[in-house]
Image: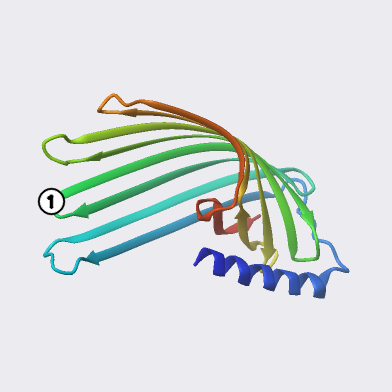
Amino acid sequence: MKKLLLCTMLFALSFAYGQEKKEKLTIDKGTWYTAGNFSIGKSNNEFEGSPETSKYFNFNFSPKVGYTINDNLIIGLGVGYGYSKSESGSEIGKGNSYQIFPYIKKHFPLGKKLTISLQGEFSYSYSDYSNNITPDPYERSTNQYFIGMRPGMTYFLNKNIALEANIGSLGYSKIDREDSDFSNSKFDSFNFSINSTDLFFGLSYYW
């Protein structure tokens, strides 16, 4: 679904660019900016020949605010929260995640309504997960750090409201994981990612 939305948005934005490339948009110094991404999902699965069902629910919310310190250059702070719950027979698993990320974002206008952007950020996130599997319930906590860049695009519907898309990420990440069975682990990597977890769509407001 996200890939379909991305292709549709790319087509619409390329058309808009062809129509409006003679004029350039400016986000003026002193402009405030706020944006938010929200997603929610739910699924129910039944298994043939078994009375048990599997259920999954999750939602994520990530608002951010920023200030334009120079034309088309924004600094700001974002936070995020996510929740998930899974049920399979008598087993129930729950998870929570929390995130904070200061950022700096540069817009490169392509027309009077369209910009591409590059966002540099440092983020820290903490997540926990637990389930009631018997006889050994399981718990896990994870600390994750990221420093890098996220390319994106913005299309202004009018002077104040815009559609946004962040497309992938490039940077360094480190993960520290602690498990209740003492199988703790650490990971670090530097890579470019463009999978579905790195595609974000949202609305933004400028004033």
141 in relation to 47, above or below: above
Q: Residues within 10 Å of mark 1 (few under 14, many from 20)?
A: few
Tell me which residue sits at (39%, 59%) in the image.
40
- Give the quadrant of residue 172: top right
155 in relation to 139, above or below: below
Residue 69 on image: x %, y %: 74, 41
Amino acid beneath label 1: Ser
Residue 8 on image: x %, y %: 62, 72
Nearer to me, 147 or 109? 147
78 in relation to 179, above or below: below
- The residue that disc 1 covers is 90
Residue 41 on image: x %, y %: 37, 61
- Give the quadrant of residue 205: bottom right
Indicate left or right for 109 with 63 as reference. Answer: right
Tell me which residue sits at (42%, 51%) in the image.
60
Tell me which residue sits at (41%, 45%) in the image.
81
Residue 61 on image: x %, y %: 44, 51
- Give the quadrant of residue 97: top left
State the quadrant of the C terminus: bottom right
